[in-house]
Amino acid sequence: MNRQVKAPAQPAEVWLFVSYSHKDDYWMQALMPLLKFPGTRVKPWNDKEIRPGVRWDKEIRDALAKMDVYIPLVSVNFAVSHYIGTMECRIAKKRHDNDEIEVVPVLVGDPGKDECAWLMALQRVPPGEKSWAEVLREFREHDFALTPIRDGIKAVVERARKRHKQGTRQELD
């Protein structure tokens, strides 16, 4: 008797939007390898994905509409960026307030007393009061400084993956 067995459906890909100031490119480059999680399909996106000859604003808006997780690299440079504040953060906050996406701020440096207040009110990585830069200085082993950041983001990715499984992912028109 021939029976065809269907392969189990692949879990949906979790889209990660990395928001950063170009002045913090070092931190974005350091973050990207941390966004690979064996067994979990993720699609990290940042503006380096924009192809030549396309409208960059449209590409960013499309990526913001697809994202399941918003990962802002919070710093003074991030806080003073007009585009990040008026476009990326505005859309991310609206989608987060509507319970459509997860947000995990990565504290690269102190953005200032009142800057990025909604992001600073969320649990961020690394956990505690220290920024990623401060944590890196304290650890002799570079990898130990990365572990809490990777683990925190992985937990948020898992929450987003569960949303997919429950079929509650919503995309903006």
Image (cartoon, rainbow, N blue to C red):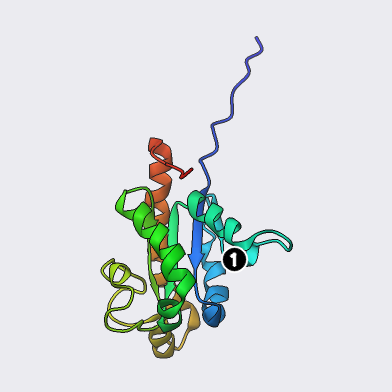
Q: Is residue 145 left or right of residue 1?
A: left
In the rendering, at what x and y percent does residue 108 appear? Answer: 42, 80
Q: Residue at x 52, y 80 (%)?
A: 24
Asked whether the viewer can see residue 81, the reply is: yes
- Pick whichever, 142 or 106, lies toward us: 106
What kind of element bears circle 1?
helix
Query: Horizontal placement of 111 versus 4: left or right?
Result: left
Query: Which residue is at 41% across, 57% downward?
Result: 91
**How dense is the environment of label 1, judged by Cα within 10 Å: few (below 14), some, or many (20 and up)?**
some
Relative to 50, say whether 107 is above or below.
below
For the residue pair 102 and 81, the one nearer the viewer reads as 81
Disc 1 designates what residue? Answer: 47
Compared to 13, does 92 lie above or below? below
Residue 166, horizontal then vertical, whole percent: 38, 36
Q: Amino acid at mark 1?
A: Asp
Residue visible at 40% across and 78% down in the picture: 79
Horizontal side of residue 93 vs 143, given as left or right? left
Residue 150 seen in render: no
State which quadrant residue 121 falls in. Answer: bottom left
